[in-house]
Amino acid sequence: MKLQEYQSKRIFAEYGIPIPQGDVATTPEEARHIAARLGKRVVIKSQVLVGGRGKAGGIKLAASASEAEAVASQILGMDIKGLKVNRVLVDEAADISREIYLGIVVDRGAGSLVMMASAEGGVDIEEVARTTPEKIYRVEIDPCLGLQTFQCRQLASDIGLETDLMNDFVKVSMGLYQAFAGCDASLAEINPLVVTGDRKLLAVDGKMVLDDNALFRHTDLAELRDPTEETFYENEARRYGLSYVRLDGCIGCMVNGAGLAMETMDIIKLYGGEPANFLDIGGGARADKVAAALRIILSDGNVCAILINIFGGITRGDEVARGILQAFEEVKPAVPIVTRLVGTNSEEGLRILAGAKMLTAGSLVEAAQMAVQASRGEAL
Ligand code: GDP
Ligand code: MN
């Protein structure tokens, strides 16, 4: 679950990280009131769950309360990378002399958390990561010991931070680590962490992603979820209890079981295709769940073929087949669909599919080859 900037920064503040004063507004009038209360130059920041808001025109300075109102009315309702802006954060503007990147992620390769820092923070950090990755310094955090202060000092010296800021940097990086650990996050990031004109550190932007599987331990954080800010896919998948991850390819996959879903993606790649998603409908899925899964896949404009791979155990083949036909009553698929169905009640399921003139395959290899062929627009 992604948190908005203002939510992330409020959490950071609880862990002792300095953030600008400010508040959230949903109307231009509210923005004016907040700016008037702050009584100084402000920055109006769109609150949407994507990066690169600055470059998209979603972050603007305002010198007075009335200008804050005008700027907020421009930004509210704006479309940023497909997301509508419903809220803005009105923060006191920072006097920025330097922008640093500081973040923590899970590094599966290293089997630990990694803290990263760069002197080249700000809106071009992705470009830095791509072209000059050596400018991003890393320390691995021992899972038993946690982040150590010497590691923070190491990072500070790597990025050439002046010694007068050393203690503040240790405080901020320790705070970020404690926020990460305390919230069961999978990512916590400050970009930029700025050095102000009067030589203080300030977290100007904040981003946190929380581990959904740990949210049951944080009922207060779980309440921060705002379904209106999530995509159709995420909402639908949660509603029907489907595990869904969108990917870049064009072959949509619907599979029962996480391991089988991984195998299905592997075999698609083996035959030269690219999966559009990971989708596990789970064990014992009934028709309505299958229909929801198909709706999700079919609403992804990149999908040019679909592979349905069902291994019937607890899940019954006839239920899945009925779910597929039920989904077709709601959404007419414009792309070829190949189904491989084996196991419990598969004969009945295949009979239902054959009755609806659906493409079926006898084995997973055959199904994958057919799906890849279909995705290239070749006749089957
Ligand atoms: P992002 O584009 O979504 O990452 O949003 P950020 O909050 O990181 O803002 C983007 C950029 O806007 C920052 O890197 C800063 O250069 C600039 N910016 C953000 N807040 C302020 C501020 O208070 N004062 C000034 N002068 N610039 C700001
Ligand atoms: Mn940023």
Image (cartoon, grey):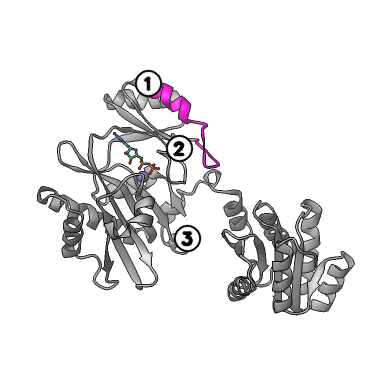
Q: Amino acid at mark 3?
A: Asp
Badge 2 density bin: few <14, some 14–19, many ≥20, Cα 10 Å: few
What residue span does the magenta drawing correspond to?
66-85
Q: Amino acid at mark 2?
A: Ala
Left-right relation of 12 to 166: right
Left-right relation of 14 to 283: left
Among the two numbered marks 2 and 1 on one chain, the one whose residue lies closer to the N terminus: 2
Q: Tell me the residue at 47%/64% (across/down).
A: 213
Tell which quarter ligand 2 is in.
Answer: top left
> Which numbered dot is residue 56?
2
Q: Is residue 79 magenta?
A: yes
The image position of residue 184, as x and y in percent, is 38, 61
> Which numbered dot is residue 242?
none
Please report contact status of discs 2 and 3: CB closer than 8 Å, yes or no: no
- Answer above or below: position of 269 versus 48: below
Q: Which residue is mark 1?
A: 67
Confirm or reject: label 2 Cβ below 8 Å from ligand 1. yes
Among the two numbered marks 1 and 3 on one chain, the one whose residue lies closer to the N terminus: 1
Q: Secondary structure at mark 2?
A: loop
> Which numbered dot is residue 212?
3
